[in-house]
Image: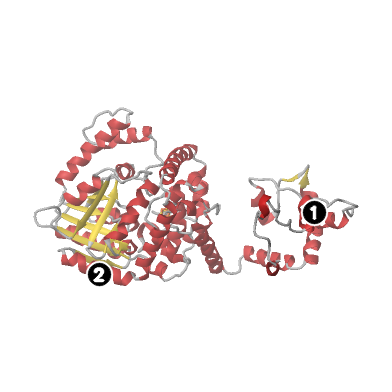
Amino acid sequence: MSDHGGLHPAQPFPEAAREQVVRAQLRANLRKVTHTIREKRANVVGELPQWEQLRTLGAATKDASLANLSDRLLQLEQSVKARGGHVHWARDAQEAREIVARIAAAHGARELIKVKSITSDEIELNRALEERGIHAIETDLAELIVQLSHDRPSHILVPAIHRNRAEIQALFNAELPGEGELPDDPAALAAAARRYLRHKFLTTKMAVSGANFAIAETGTVCVVESEGNGRMCVTLPEVLVSIMGIEKVLETWEDISVFMELLPRSSTAERMNPYNSFWSGVTPGDGPQEFHLVLLDNGRTNVLADDFGRQTLRCIRCSACLNVCPVYERAGGHAYGSVYPGPIGAILTPQLLGMHDKNANTLPGASSLCGACYDVCPVKINIPQVLIYLRSEANLQKGLTAEALAMKGMKFVMSEGWRFEGALELARVGQGPLVHGDAITSLPGPLAGWTQVRDLKPFPKEGFRDWWRNRPAPVDAAPPAIVQKAEEGPVPPQKKEGGQFDAEPPREDTL
Ligand code: SF4
């Protein structure tokens, strides 16, 4: 288990993606769900004329908090402690796992319930607890499906997006005790999961949650969710542990209001989120009587230290960028090899792990740079620009590769017209044996990859420069209308009846 937990991709992205894109059923499942959510999102976002201003405000609010992050976190710590809670600081995944395991051991917990678990997936909490004989039960329906099938989440919002109904029916029939043979009906499947989880909510003494936001001035932690399972987790057990990335802190209650508009419309395409749970420390006789907040760094301070990459920490994990990404739609979440898939994963994972990580630094290549992710991001993270920035960082890490040498050669050739034309002439002659009909279907050596899935057009016999030089000079050709008009000069203002001008005549000093 690495210190960075579930962040680390086991393979470079191109290798992992190659294994995933051949799965037709996976592509069909992904396409169906992402297109449905993206259309709904576009509709509800279109209802708000001030959406662009909201995005700007969201970005500015997060930036302001990040600019004073250490002060905000210390303020949060004081506020949580003042309300009877405990605060723990975890430098990496291992420290965070140890903290949660210690709390569980102190209470003799053999089982705990979980909600909003992406940060706990980041630290691989379930596996660490299992090794100590503590079973963690996911209570989000999609997370439960992933857990029962011993799978990994492949989407931030819809972790079981890669599973269809028939697969879930078979899984529940095999894994949910005492339910008998369940029908292929979403309502019946959801009801079976509800019965199973309700029993767990009422009998489990400890819960672990993630956090969407925390408010420094009051020590309030917030979980935003759709099913009500989060509300159960943060109110019913006796002990509650919340694990939160340090970038989630906001300063004031006013700050959170903008995200209550931005988040539901961007993630589930709803105008308002169904369940928003807020809690501040402990309240005697009401809710958990012991509350622990684990503040997780795990590479975030490195991202914060990078002036350009820092905007990545604005992310509110809405997953809108996943739903519009053509690469995610075809490769799926598992291809990213980390708990953070899609465009946000392509920039967050390599920065958290460091660009020296040989697998993570291939992730910025997982994009067509179409810009759709930037257009939908509610906090205006310029993902395409960060991708380009990280690609250049990755190239620096690689040193003088064959690709870098080829680029240097291209720069040398293209920086002088005569060199470029000479190279074109050579290419025209050299391509002869490779041209079949009007295409090059197979390139030799290291260039072979280009023609594995596409044909190349051969260089034309006459290039543009030759054509331009050799074209017959235009004889007595009338200039285009727009040129004629410009040559005629400005039309003077016309006098109307009664001696009035249509417009102010141009003053001499402006002519
Ligand atoms: S990067 Fe933007 S669009 Fe993507 S998950 Fe984060 S907030 Fe949402």
* Circles 1, 2 touching at the beta carbon (< 8 Å): no
Residue 325 x, y percent position in the rendering: 49, 48
Q: Is residue 505 left or right of residue 35?
A: right
Picture quadrant where residue 469 is located: bottom right
| SS for dot 2 | helix
Judge from the rendering whether residue 106 lies leftward or rightward of residue 276; answer left or right. Answer: left
Say if 161 sits above or below 445 in the image. Answer: above
- Viewer-side residue, 503 vs 418: 503
Tell me the amino acid under the disc marked 2. Answer: Gln
Q: Say whether disc 1 or disc 2 marks the residue closer to the N-terminus.
A: 2
Q: Quadrant of the C terminus?
A: bottom right
**Taking the image as drawn, is residue 398 in sight?**
yes
| Disc marking residue 484 | 1
Q: Which residue is farthest front?
A: 498
- Type of the residue with mark 1: Gln
Say which residue label 2 marks: 75
Q: Alpha carbon of mark 1 to alpha carbon of mark 2: how far?
A: 70 Å
Residue at x 53% of width, y 56% of height = 365
